[in-house]
Image (cartoon, rainbow, N blue to C red):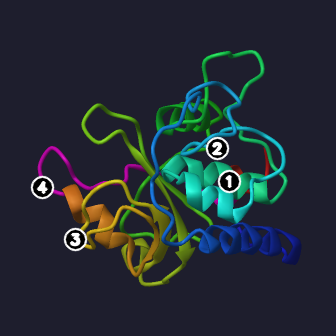
Amino acid sequence: MKYNAEQTKIIKKSLAFAKKLQCTGRGKVSDNAYKKGSNKPPYWAANGIVPSIAEIKKGGVNCVGLINLMRRAIGLKVSVLNPNDKTRFGDTGEWFSYLKKEKRLKEFNISKSYPVGTLLLRNYNPIDYGHVAVIYEENKKGVLFSKLIHSVGWCDGSGKKVVKIDDSVGRSYFCQYNGKNNKGHYTHICLPEDWLLKN
């Protein structure tokens, strides 16, 4: 899909907000962080006005907290916060389930190039808890060469668990790659029009 000027502006605004959170740590899971609609770190899974950058940096943000805040920064709701479901608070598994149910997920393909704003996903699992990241800069050579922004929660060689922009998707994709039962970190993608340009 080719994005018009207004759509491109929205995507850029969301990514510009995320960039302001570079070097923000993961923080600790605060009281009531798991409560539905809680405006607490590290998930920030509430709708409405975004907390100040200073408040977010002080509290910390995890990978899902980052995408929750990116949506809120452009006036969107946290999609998984269904008012009829009192248990959801916006973690990786809930985002994955929501997007799958809405038929917005596609299988991750290392031979393709995805546009800026594309969400990369790995579903929740008890080993690494899943992950989400966002294409920050597309490289037409392929997704593995594109830059991405995410909150890193594992040791990736940098020694830091923070919000960061990686020079390549390959850096995190191959962090758990073994070529056999684990083909790579990301399993699915969600295009910008399916998570960042609509509720």
Amino acid on which the number 4 mark rests in the picture = Asn
Look at mark 1 in the image and give the residue it sits on: 69
Comes first in the chain, label 1 or label 4: 1
Of the two numbered discs 1 and 3 on the same chain, state the one appearing first in sequence.
Answer: 1
Indicate the quadrant where residue 199 lies. top right
Image point 75% across, 15% down: which residue? 84
Q: Which is nearer the eye, 171 or 89? A: 89
> Is 168 situated above or below 177?
below
Q: CA distance from mark 2 to mark 4?
A: 33 Å
Q: Compared with residue 13, is residue 92 higher up or lower down, i.e. above or below? A: above
Element on which disc 3 rests: loop
Nearest to viewer (mark 2 / mark 4): 2
- The disc placed on residue 157 is 3
Q: Residue at x 46, y 60 (%)?
A: 25
- Other residues around mark 3 within 10 Å, as few (<14) / some (14–19) / many (≥20): few
Is there CB contact under 8 Å for labels 2 and 3? Answer: no
Position of residue 161 measured from the top left corner of the image (x, y, whole percent) = 36, 61
Q: Which residue range is magenta in the image?
A: 177-192
